[in-house]
Amino acid sequence: MAETSYAAFYRRSVESPEAFWAEQAQAIDWQRTWDQVLDRSHPPFAAWFVGAQTNLCHNVVDRHLADRAQQSALVYVSTETGQERSLTYAELHREVQIMAASLQSLGVGKGDRVLIYMPMIPEAVFAMLACVRLGAIHSVVFGGFASVSLAARIDDAQPKVIVSADAGSRGGKVMPYKPLLDEALRLSQHPAQRVIVVDRGLADWAQQDGRDMAYAELRAAHAQAQVPCVWVESTHPSYILYTSGTTGKPKGVQRDTGGYAVALHLSMRAIFGGKPGETFFCTSDIGWVVGHSYIVYAPLLTGMTTILYEGTPIRPDAAVFWRIAEQYRANLMFSAPTAMRVLKRHDPALLKRHDLSALRAIFLAGEPLDEPTGRWVAESLGKPVIDNYWQTETGWPILATPRGFPEVPSRPGSPGVAMPGYKVCLRNETDGEPVAPGEKGVVAIDWPLPPGCLQTIWGDDARFVHTYWSTYPNRQVYSTFDWGRQDAEGYLYILGRTDDVINVAGHRLGTREIEESISAHPAVAEVAVVGVQDALKGQAAWAFVVLRPGQLDAASTQQASIAAHVDAQLGAVARPQRICLVTALPKTRSGKMLRRAIQAICEGRDPGDLTTLEDPLALQQIPDAIARS
Ligand code: AMP
């Protein structure tokens, strides 16, 4: 970072992106250098480091062997099983090669997809790194998703191999994975996979001959395997990560290889202020983008030690994060506002019990950070709290206050300013014109997106263009689907989504996905799902259900049955907090569901202009339905 001021650094990133990113790319090992830094020939697509070859696994593991073979790379802490384990870079290298050889023995090669449906165990990280070592494309599915969600992702990604486990554990309760996977494969249109099962000894599992294999057997067979990294084009996909949108069908966010490595390396230095040899503790899950980027790739690209934690924030007590941070001398932490709101309900003395002298800052992202929670964490810990705003699509922060440039202070209520390469502009919803400072607008980013952001939607370029780049005809502008406001100094404030996507405890859920699942319940005639403000989780899903004729007698049984149905299909993560029974749903005369009006009533706000409402009674019965639920 040649510049001394963030303003100069940022300006160069957007005014001379080719020169800026070529310079940042020096931090990464390339097998072959690029012919072109940025291919601008097919907007809104942007291809970074075209013609170059590299390997992500080489950059996160192998290249550190010369200097840090004996440094701890991965620390594993499970308060669920009581296991703690530390692997050096040399040991990680060995384990990744064993997993890579295992995948290879099942036919996995460059470009093949491998679906990873696993709890927070080191083998999940080995599997991710083994895939990118081979040039295979991983798709990690969050362990909280159930069989229908999983089947949809299997059908879209069409993996050659699935890596899973017998079970996870949450709050001391064993959560079997294998039966959900078996059911997903039964539902799938693409059932020809091989399945590797990491048997943790937590739950019995049925082995299907010819399809399922225990990882222990593969591991023993390949214990000494040497598997070289496969050099791939910079633009070769490294992974697919599914995220919710406004339709029922999740979108497979596709990430490249070289651009991602360059962007994440820059982010760790400039935004997080992390240095080689330091320790990073991110409490997210590998099933989410934060886990991909800041449990696995960015810390390891930087030669740091990363902590992988299986457990909740409050077990055995609400000091567990800080106990781990103390024990492993964490220098930087990354968590979510909901986790902090959970801790806020416990004794504040717990935040003072441990020696956090190594800790420099805590980063929070994934959902809005309310000011009282941000202030509470900062005061209780006596450490800076850095809000940062981004999306699965971008892979790394769009807005933050960069720790590498201390002259940009954080401001309560704002995630910060635009990060390098992001030409953030607040635009008028109707014509796309930039709004004046202080006015509300859609948070948009001018083309091209910087390296590390999504290349496309897996298998669906048209959906990529249509979803993200078509809000304003004749403008190459990416929509985040968030509302925002910007002050005169460039700080942005995020004001909620412009679409029907909701955010429950930092987990992004499409209301349509939940509606589709509930609609499939035999007693349900019609349903609307809305996101309602929640003091703990930010938002909660509430479902308004019209039952089929003759089903009303057993109303409470139906509510429980609908909740169980969503659990089984999508997973408990998507279960509505309330299921309210109504006899009609508010719609316009043209049949459009008035979700915004329902949401307003749920939050005690004025539902606004209702002149187009077909049946006023439909809205009037909502407060009663809420009271009864
Ligand atoms: P996801 O792709 O699941 O990470 O969800 C991204 C969405 O979460 C964004 O579009 C925002 O709506 C929300 N979000 C993420 N980080 C923040 C933040 N720091 N402040 C406000 N909203 C956020």
Image (cartoon, rainbow, N blue to C red):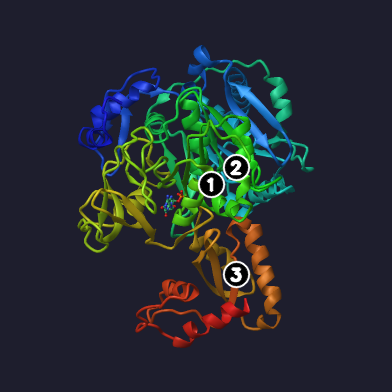
Q: Position of residue 126 (x, y in %)?
A: 60, 29
Q: Residues within 10 Å of mark 3 (few under 14, many from 20)?
A: some
Badge 3 element: strand
CA gap between label 2 and label 1 equals: 7 Å
Is residue 531 or residue 240 the one in the foreground? 531
Amino acid type indicated by mark 2: Lys
Left or right of 441 on screen, residue 300:
right
**Residue drawn at x 39%, y 54% as measured from the top left:** 413
Mark 1 or mark 3, whichever is nearer to me: 1
Residue that lies at the very extreme toward the top in this rendered image:
66
Amino acid type indicated by mark 1: Ser
CA gap between label 1 and label 3 equals: 34 Å
Number of the label disc, if any, that sits on residue 352: 2
For the question of whether residue 149 can be seen, the reply is: yes
Quadrant of the drawing holding the N terminus: top left
Number of the label disc, if any, that sits on residue 578: 3
Number of the label disc, if any, that sits on residue 624: none
Q: Position of residue 361 (x, y in %)?
A: 47, 38
- Residue located beneath label 1 in the image: 380
